[in-house]
Amino acid sequence: MRRSAVALVSAAALVALPVLPVLPDGPGGQGAAAYAAGPGAGAGPAGATVRYAQGHWRGGWAAAPQQANEVLGKNWSEGGFARQTVRQVVRVSTGGTQARIRLSNRYGATPLKVAGATVARTAQGASVQAGSVRQLTFGHRRSATIPAGGELPSDGVGLRVRALESVTVTLYLDAPTGPATFHAMAMATSYRAAGDRRSDVGAAAFTETSQSWYYLSGVEVAGGGPAARSDGVVAFGDSITDGYGSTVDANRRYPDQLAERFAAAGRPRSVLDEGISGNQLTSSTSGFGEKAVVRFRKDALKAPNVGTVVVLEGINDIGMSEWGGAPGGPTPEVSVRQLIAAQRVLIRQAHGRGIRVIGATLTPFRGAAYYTERGEIKREALNDWIRTSGEFDGVVDLDHALADPADRGRIAPAYDEGDHLHPNDAGYRAMADAVDVNAF
């Protein structure tokens, strides 16, 4: 398994990191979202700006925004950017003939000025396919300013992409940005160059790398088939949804492999990964994101044409609150009753939008750095409620899918990334295989 010392910490270190101050509801809720794309619809020649009504768009790829920090390793978020180009490669779960991006300044203290942006089909590394570079606009302008706390979609542009194809998004940031809204654990390589290199086809100028995503929170597609339906799937959770421990640049997270199953069945659809490593249901921290009951509306329910959310959250609430050896002390102790109440909040929020919710049982963690017998009792009790309460619209038993038959509280050795908490590529595949794609 390929690793990077820059963006990955060891599995033991992931749970041994200092627990950061608990925030009441997390920052970033202030400020109305800024939207440049208006209603209207149309199709134009390749490369032409195209305007679509919101209902035409479907999510191709997504990442949950986070506040700048270096808890999981060195990155570019705290320093931000100035007169630099950042190039990011992502794989879309479904294809189309038009594309647009979504940028987030959710945790910015000041307005973010984007001098220019492009999207292209990926070649290799930081290079893109010749003839595929499309200049993006925002409200028909090449540059844009996103208010602090806001987000902004680009206008649509003609670019034919297939399901499971990678696209490259390039942002030129001229004025100093300050600390950047980002996604820490990308499990993918991003690239940086000095000056304006947004239209470069080659990779030569992109001499710096990172394994986080910056400002980019979504890539959406339209066209190429019937009008978008509300059949998109959001995978919502913590590091096990985020894909910690999977092979870098290989798209081996469980939501990626779930998207592959839909495509193999001839029914490609939006499968969006809204996991944040270290995230909790009931406590917000500046390093591991806002608590799930706060960020769920912003990260899971605002995705275009989403019909189903799969929720896998709670193991960090249990582990971090039970582990007295955590530097800085544990997060507040949480009871099974509190975990169930938080899950019910997510269910109500989703049902209020007409979205169905699939409950995922918490995966085994015996042997992990923050494992305790008391924590295991809580995990088993929460899993029993998920399986039997009938409050979810469906259940996917990931506990059963990953458990060692000889010790049901432990991940099977073939699926263990090595820290007894996170799956490896094969484990993430087993998680994806546990989902009944015919039920969607």
Image (cartoon, rainbow, N blue to C red):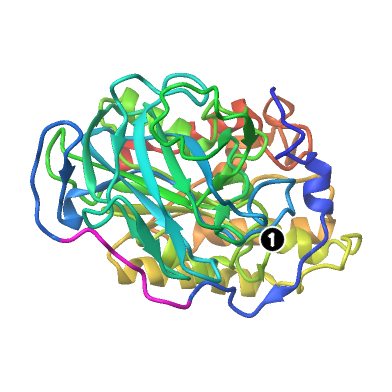
The range drawn in magenta is 30-38
- Front position in the image: 347 or 165: 165
**SS for callout 1:** loop
Q: Badge 1, how many Cα within 10 Å: few under 14, some, many 20+? A: many
Q: Position of residue 62 (x, y in %)?
A: 43, 47
Q: Position of residue 183 (x, y in %)?
A: 57, 50
Q: Classify the position of the N terminus by image quarter.
A: top right
Residue in the picture at 77% in, 34% down: 5
Q: Is residue 434 visible?
A: no
Residue in the picture at 85% in, 61% down: 323
Q: Position of residue 61 (x, y in %)?
A: 39, 42
Residue in the picture at 55% in, 22% down: 204
- Front position in the image: 347 or 100: 100
Which quadrant of the structure image shows residue 21? bottom right
Q: Position of residue 116 (x, y in %)?
A: 38, 47
- Assess whether residue 36 is covered by the magenta stretch: yes
Residue bearing mark 1: 287
Q: Is residue 263 visible?
A: yes
Give the side of residue 126 with respect to residue 338, left or right: left
Give the side of residue 418 with respect to residue 211, left or right: right
Residue in the picture at 23% in, 52% down: 230
Q: From what the image shows, is residue 384 above or below residue 27?
A: above
Amino acid of disc 1:
Gly
- Assess whether residue 274 is covered by the magenta stretch: no
